[in-house]
Amino acid sequence: MFPFILVLLFLGPGVLLSSTHVAVISPQDPVLRMGSSLTATCSLSPEPGLHAGSLYWTLNGVCLSSSSYTLLSSTSLSVTLHNLNGSQQHSGDNLVCHGANGHVLAGSCLYVGMPPEKPVNLTCWSRNTKDLSCKWRPGGRGETHIRTKYILKYKLRWYGREKECENDSTGRQRYSCYIPRNLALFTPYEIWVEAANQLGSATSDITTLDILDVVTTDPPAHVQVSRVGHLEDQLTVRWASPPELKDVLFQAKYQIRYRLEDSNQWKVVNDVGNQTSCRLAGLRPGTIYFVQVRCNPVGIYGSRKAGIWSDWSHPAAASTPSHVRLQSGSCTPQPGEQNSTLRRELKQFLGWVRKHTHGCGGMSIKLYDQWRVWLQKSHRKRNQVEPRHPQRDCDLVEEFRSLVLAPRTHRKPSLYRD
């Protein structure tokens, strides 16, 4: 009855006075399943000058066909609606009886919908072990067309009383709930969702979880990206562990993703492990890259579950150095089998180096850096002394190849300095 009073108040106080004394619609504010039929009757009070044959009906402001009317008496006019669709608004559809002059004589709200189905996909997560957030999806197609209330309920598995977390049923967070405090650790919870409206109710399956098994962290802090000297195809990424968990016993694994400035395609580095820095290799020279990092707590307080990935950190950016072409010419093929063998072995060596420089390697990265820096310095030094010659470039690379492939005791110490 309350929605009907609101409609009449909106139309004006004169309408409320008129409808109270002139006419009434029955049934008043019915709740019906979709596909149902309804016959409503507008009954006039005895009053000079009014006859039911002059009345007409509207639904949500649209006139209903007179073929659906039935004149029951001089004071009663009914209308029959078949195969009703779901209500267009949760406050109900407005069925109104009008006088010949268009005045509203009486009104009723129709609630047409479906009972809720069993909620599904209930998932929960805890931010830094401090709270609990849950979300779910309504069962079936989801839309009941009438106001449906969802309540998340939870309790400790073996003891404790049942508690409720009533969700905000509006906007984007319609099927979610947030429990901000007073949660127990090391004890499993039973969690479920109940849905109810005027046509029925439904309950989800019970989810059993320990808060420690569903922990997610804040994104890693202080993400920084920097160049690796003058190497034009590499960047170093550094970050700090999530600050909220600095006193919590856990290990973490990290992921990095990066993209070109003018691209929406991210490339993910999965094998970062528990370290808080990583080298990105194989990048384009003279290019700006955006980088993000996220964290997954592993084995928090001894939990056997892997945890949940955090959100990605705010993007950090850096550019690789511009590519500078060295006037080194090319290793021009020379006659003879010896030179052909050298070129083949050199190609294999460089391929081996490049193969082991992607991701976050150790020694292979170091050798690669040393080769690049050593070769550039050798080119600059020889450029200052004498003109370039293609064969000397081949000799330089072969010299470095001999050094890195020689036994460790015979290598020059300069090759292993940071």
Image: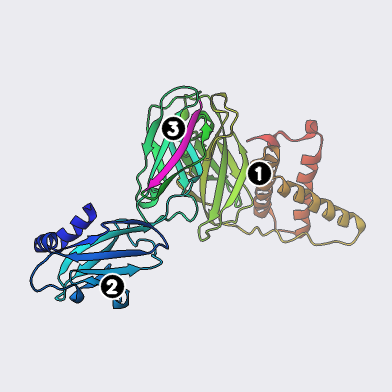
Residue reaching furthest right?
337
For image coordinates 57% across by 42% down, the residue present is 255
- Colouring scheme, one of rainbow, by chain, secondary structure, one colour: rainbow
In front of the other: 290 or 334: 290
Say what amino acid the circle numbered 1 marks: Asp
Q: Which mark is residue 52?
A: none
Report the magenta stretch's main SS: strand
Which quarter of the figure is the C terminus placed in?
A: top right
Q: Are marks 3 and 2 in contact (CB under 8 Å)?
A: no
Q: Position of residue 146 (x, y in %)?
A: 36, 54
Corner quadrant of residue 153: top left
Say what amino acid the circle numbered 2 marks: Thr
Q: Secondary structure at mark 2?
A: strand
In three-dimensional space, the C-alpha distance between marks 3 and 2, rounded to whole angstroms, equals: 53 Å
Disc 1 crowd rating (10 Å Cα; few below 14, some 14-19, many 20+) is many
Up-down: is 207 above or below 19? Answer: above
- Horizontally, is 241 left or right of 36 in the view? right
Query: Residue 195 colored magenta?
Result: yes
Query: Residue 417 colored magenta?
Result: no
- Horizontally, is 69 left or right of 241 in the view? left
In front of the other: 378 or 162: 162
Disc 1 target residue: 369
For image coordinates 16% across by 72% down, the residue present is 99
Residue reaching furthest front?
73
Which residues, given as a range, are shown in magenta?
188-197
Q: Position of residue 48 (x, y in %)?
A: 7, 71
Up-down: is 70 above or below 26? Answer: below
Up-down: is 223 above or below 18? Answer: above
Disc 3 target residue: 154
The numbered mark, 1 or 2, whose residue comes first in the sequence reads: 2
Q: Position of residue 311 (x, y in %)?
A: 48, 43
